Amino acid sequence: MADIPRAVVGKYPQKSVRKRLEAFFLDNVGKIATREQVQQVARDPKTKEIPENWHQRLSELRTDSGYTILTHRDRKELKISEYLMLTADRRPAASARVRPSTQTWKKVLERATHRCEWNEGGETCDNKESAIDPIGGGTVHLTPDHKTPHSVNPASDPNDANAWQALCGRHQIVKKNFWDSVSGKLNAYAIVQAASKTVKREIYAFLKDFFAEEE
């Protein structure tokens, strides 16, 4: 299997991250791509910034578009953070991602009082729509989240408000960021960040005790 020359990276002008990644892998069937190369292809052609959701868009090529893109979990000769599309053939695509109906989303927001419903240890995030996130910064924008992940039940009822919750952008990311499927490691920072204040204090006490001998 051949590596991809660096020269091919950066030549994809498609408007969406997903389309850029798709074109890149189709151009390089049978060749090993590195994480760095995938990130460079995902880079916005205008702003030159690497989008935070590049890995999610890569995942969608597998789940939604039906491409088989292998990693070190699939082939022992692949290193961590290497990807390989062996063929351009596509499996039957997963069902389209369902979104709540307009009326359902209205009910969810009313139930949530237009605040983030992330709950950890009995404590809710409570970030309010259009407010400034006191932790992550930026304006809070609530979006619908499947209570049962799409990968488990792709047919969430768009008319059942109990199947959905309102999450701020930070907690949408945190929810999907507990496990780094590239490195195969737990994202301990994200887990601690999402924990309640009570749990954070317990972790803090544990770490103080753990590192006491080094002080």
Image: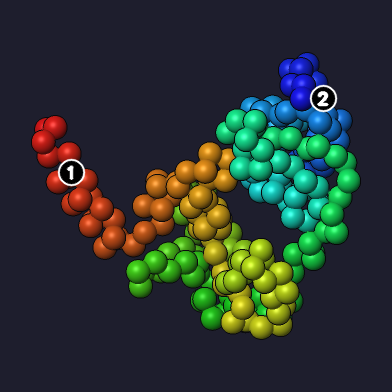
- Check the image and report above or below for 163 versus 142: below
Q: Residues within 10 Å of mark 1 (few under 14, many from 20)?
A: few
Horizontal side of 96 relative to 58 (left or right) equals: right
Q: Nearer the viewer, residue 161 or 203?
A: 203
Check disc 2 and report the residue beneath it: 11
- Check the image and report above or below for 97 versus 111: above
Residue 113 place in picture, x, y as percent: 51, 76
Q: Quick one: SS at disc 1?
A: helix
Check disc 1 and report the residue beneath it: 210
Amino acid type, callout 2: Lys
Give me the residue at 35% from left, 69% from top. Answer: 121
Horizontal side of 123 relative to 30 (left or right) equals: left
Residue 208 place in picture, x, y as percent: 17, 45
Give me the residue at 84% from left, 33% from top. Answer: 29
Amino acid type, callout 1: Phe
Residue 78 place in picture, x, y as percent: 64, 32
